[in-house]
Image (cartoon, grey):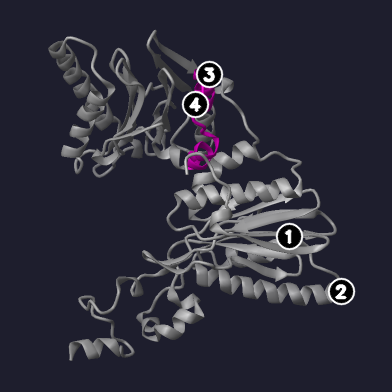
């Protein structure tokens, strides 16, 4: 009895494995994520929504250590609330991304999470920011998480400037589906969030409704 | 004195790591990094590889040929786990003989070269006995036999591709551990992870030879853009009943994508 450690997944760190993606279009952004949370080989949550709101029109996509990512998102959510009250209007996406970056950079040795921040604001429209390892860079689209390695080639080939909202949503669904079928740490359902001036729309695509490709 | 001693390395002695006269990359292991790909089409196969060999951050060879002929219409593409040793490369062996004595374990490029040599010999002999060209499946099985038997000692991942009269164009994958599986399309090497998604979405059964060549060139180009260990030129070969047709696509002629 003494020395029996129990099942391996009790002691493994909980990671979100993950594939996350965010892409901007003229007038808004589309974010997407899978829904698998793993602890070693065990899937501890198969329906987790990794797209976390930082503000009404600003969302972030979580990847890496689940605890670290969630905590960063909660802290920035609070800081943004305070900030938006102080300035008396909706915060800019760049401000949210900067707050995330400040935490990621200051605690970069202790934390292992990567958040992609995306949203819409009145000044610059739809924007996507990557904050990996404490940098801050605006990009037309960003992918992250363990599953992203498998789809770099796909997104490089398929991305075109000036895609419409529907094309972006299809692009995100295709990318997630491809990554989820190759990465053991990504899977489940696909969550897609579309943010523009008028609304913030959350959508779920169930497993069997995901786009399918040639399977050998 | 110290400088002179380290410039003439003795058997059994290592170059002092503090010596600035000797660059860092001479101490690094040689790796072929790599992206390789093989696709079947009706009537043959198309194979492709990048051309970069690295020692640490230095590119030792930017025009490597990673497509190895095993027989007239059978090729193998070697995907190298980065623990390749200087042992494998005859040029390096001549340049730094002192490093051989350090007891380097054989890494996988040495492994794949050795296995390829053995299989080429066995296949040549078998073909003479049969008095006809060998089957691709035979070559693949010979690779598998060696890889599986010595699986604890080896670390070699190989793609075998070719054409024979019985089954036409075939691609067989022999990954680390010694499994054998036939696949219509297969990728390997460090750069391959980046193009799984592209391959899954763009490959369809029933492509023509030219479509396969385009697909391979595009996939390799995407992988080379993202993987630091892959790069240089794209070497393609198409194998069919008529023979082997090789071509090289230079860097500035590679397909371009909007994010590049």
Nearest-to-viewer mark from 1 and 3: 3
**Which contiguous range is marked in magenta?**
A150-173
Marks 3 and 4 in Cβ contact (< 8 Å): no
Can you identify the residue that label 4 sits on? Answer: A162
Q: Position of residue A10 (x, y in %)?
A: 31, 35
Q: Which mark is residue B162?
A: 1
Name the foreground residue: A57 vs B27.
Answer: A57
Q: Which mark is residue A191?
A: none
- In the rendered structure, the answer to whether residue A51 lies left or right of residue A96 reads right
CA–CA distance in space, label 4 to label 2: 61 Å
The extreme right residue here reads: B131
Nearest-to-viewer mark from 3 and 4: 4
Q: Check if residue B165 falls in the magenta segment.
A: no
The extreme top residue here reads: A198
Chain ID, mark 3: A
Q: Position of residue B84 (x, y in %)?
A: 45, 68
Q: Secondary structure at mark 4?
A: loop
Residue drawn 85% across the image and 59% down it: B165
Query: Would you place residue B45 above or below residue A71 in this image?
Result: below
Can you identify the residue that label 3 sits on? Answer: A166
Q: Position of residue A205 (x, y in %)?
A: 51, 18
**Quadrant occupied by the N terminus of chain A:** top left
Q: Secondary structure at mark 2?
A: loop
């Amino acid at each position: 009895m003494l020395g029996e450690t129990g099942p391996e997944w009790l002691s493994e760190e909980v990671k979100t494995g993950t594939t996350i993606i965010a892409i901007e279009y003229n007038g808004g952004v589309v974010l997407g994520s899978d829904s698998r949370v793993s602890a070693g080989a065990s899937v501890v949550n198969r329906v987790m929504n990794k797209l976390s709101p930082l503000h009404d029109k600003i969302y972030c996509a979580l990847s890496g250590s689940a605890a670290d990512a969630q905590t960063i998102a909660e802290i920035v959510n609070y800081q943004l609330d305070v900030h938006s009250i102080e300035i008396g209007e909706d915060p800019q996406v760049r401000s949210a991304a900067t707050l995330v970056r400040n935490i990621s950079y200051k605690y970069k040795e202790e934390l292992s999470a990567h958040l992609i921040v995306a949203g819409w604001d009145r000044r610059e429209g739809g924007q996507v920011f990557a904050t990996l390892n404490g940098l801050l860079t605006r990009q037309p689209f960003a992918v992250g998480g363990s599953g992203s390695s498998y789809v770099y080639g796909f997104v490089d080939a398929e991305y075109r400037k000036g895609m419409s909202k529907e094309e972006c949503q299809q692009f995100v669904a295709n990318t997630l589906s491809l990554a989820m079928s190759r990465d053991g740490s990504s899977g489940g359902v696909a969550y897609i969030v579309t943010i523009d001036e008028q609304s913030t729309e959350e959508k779920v695509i169930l497993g069997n409704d995901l786009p399918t490709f040639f399977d050998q | 004195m110290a400088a002179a001693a380290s410039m003439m390395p003795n058997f059994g002695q290592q170059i002092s790591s503090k010596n600035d006269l000797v660059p860092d990359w001479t101490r690094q292991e040689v790796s072929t990094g790599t992206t390789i790909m093989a696709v079947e089409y009706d009537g043959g196969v198309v194979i492709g590889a990048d051309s970069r060999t690295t020692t640490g951050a230095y590119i030792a060879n930017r025009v490597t040929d990673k497509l190895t002929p095993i027989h007239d219409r059978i090729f193998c593409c070697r995907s190298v786990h980065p623990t390749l040793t200087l042992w494998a490369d005859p040029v390096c062996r001549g340049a730094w003989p002192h490093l051989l004595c350090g007891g380097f374990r054989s890494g996988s490029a040495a492994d794949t070269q050795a296995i390829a040599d053995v299989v080429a010999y066995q296949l040549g002999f078998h073909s003479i006995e049969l008095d006809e060209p060998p089957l691709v499946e035979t070559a693949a099985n010979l690779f598998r036999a060696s890889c599986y038997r010595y699986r604890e000692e080896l670390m070699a991942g190989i793609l075998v591709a070719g054409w024979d009269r019985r089954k036409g164009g075939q691609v067989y994958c022999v990954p680390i551990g010694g499994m054998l599986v036939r696949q219509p399309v297969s990728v390997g090497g460090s750069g391959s992870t980046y193009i799984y998604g592209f391959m899954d979405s763009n490959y369809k059964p029933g492509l023509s030879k030219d479509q396969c060549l385009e697909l391979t060139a595009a996939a390799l180009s995407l992988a080379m853009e993202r993987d630091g260990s892959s790069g240089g030129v794209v070497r393609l070969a198409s194998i069919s009943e008529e023979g082997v047709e090789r071509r090289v696509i230079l860097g500035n002629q590679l397909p371009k994508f909007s994010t590049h």
